[in-house]
Image: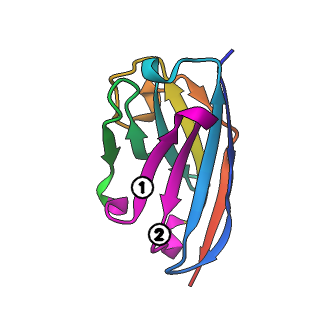
Amino acid sequence: EVQLAESGGGSAQAGGSLRLACEYSGFRVEEYARAWFSQVTGKEREGISAIAGDDGSRYYVNAVKGRFTISNDNAKNTVYLQMNSLKPDDTAVYYCAATKYGGHYYPLASTYDYWGQGTQVTVSS
């Protein structure tokens, strides 16, 4: 059974940093891509970043390029999202997700099959 569980959310000042972690189980990392999404109440879930399972290729949406970094620790079965230079607009619930297509690394919500429960990130000005 595929399971994902996020942690690391919280509050930060604008310009600060947070690191989100998503511990996963139930699949082989090389066979599944993983991604991070954000969602603001009343809006659709938006892709932030993704990492391919087969070769570790990474994708970032323009809004977070240069500020956020996705990485994976195979030994800990954990994918991270390092969030630097945070802005109030980054405030959202953040979800990690996985899809069984290992070569896929575009964060489009409809293409991901498994989801964590989400973690709140609040950035104040």
Mark 1 and mark 2 residues within 8 Å of each other at the beta carbon: yes
Res. 16 visible in picture: yes
Residue 82 sits inside the magenta stretch = yes
- The residue located at (49%, 72%) in the rendering is 86
**Render colour scheme:** rainbow
Q: Quadrant of the C terminus?
A: bottom right
* Magenta residues, start to end: 63-90
Residue 106's quadrant in the figure? top left
Judge whether 83 appears above or below 20 on screen: below
Mark carried by residue 110? none
Judge whether 58 appears above or below 122 on screen: above
Q: Quadrant of the N terminus?
A: top right
Q: Which residue is under mark 1?
A: 69
> Residue 57 appears at what percent x and percent y?
31, 36
- Label 1 Cα crowd, 10 Å radius (few <14 / some 14-19 / many 20+): some
Name the kind of residue labelled 1 in the image. Thr
Name the kind of residue labelled 2 in the image. Asn
Res. 44 visible in picture: no
Horizontal arrangement in the rendering, residue 27 relative to residue 32 (left or right): right
- The residue located at (49%, 80%) in the rendering is 15
> Residue 19 appears at what percent x and percent y?
58, 59
Residue 100 sits inside the magenta stretch = no
Of mark 1 and mark 2, the one earlier in the sequence is 1
The residues bearing labels 1 and 2 have C-alpha atoms spaced at a distance of 8 Å
> Residue 61 appears at what percent x and percent y?
33, 52
Q: Which residue is under mark 2?
A: 84
- Label 2 Cα crowd, 10 Å radius (few <14 / some 14-19 / many 20+): some
- The residue located at (35%, 34%) in the rendering is 56
Secondary element under disc 1, as helix, strand or loop, is: strand
Secondary element under disc 2, as helix, strand or loop, is: loop
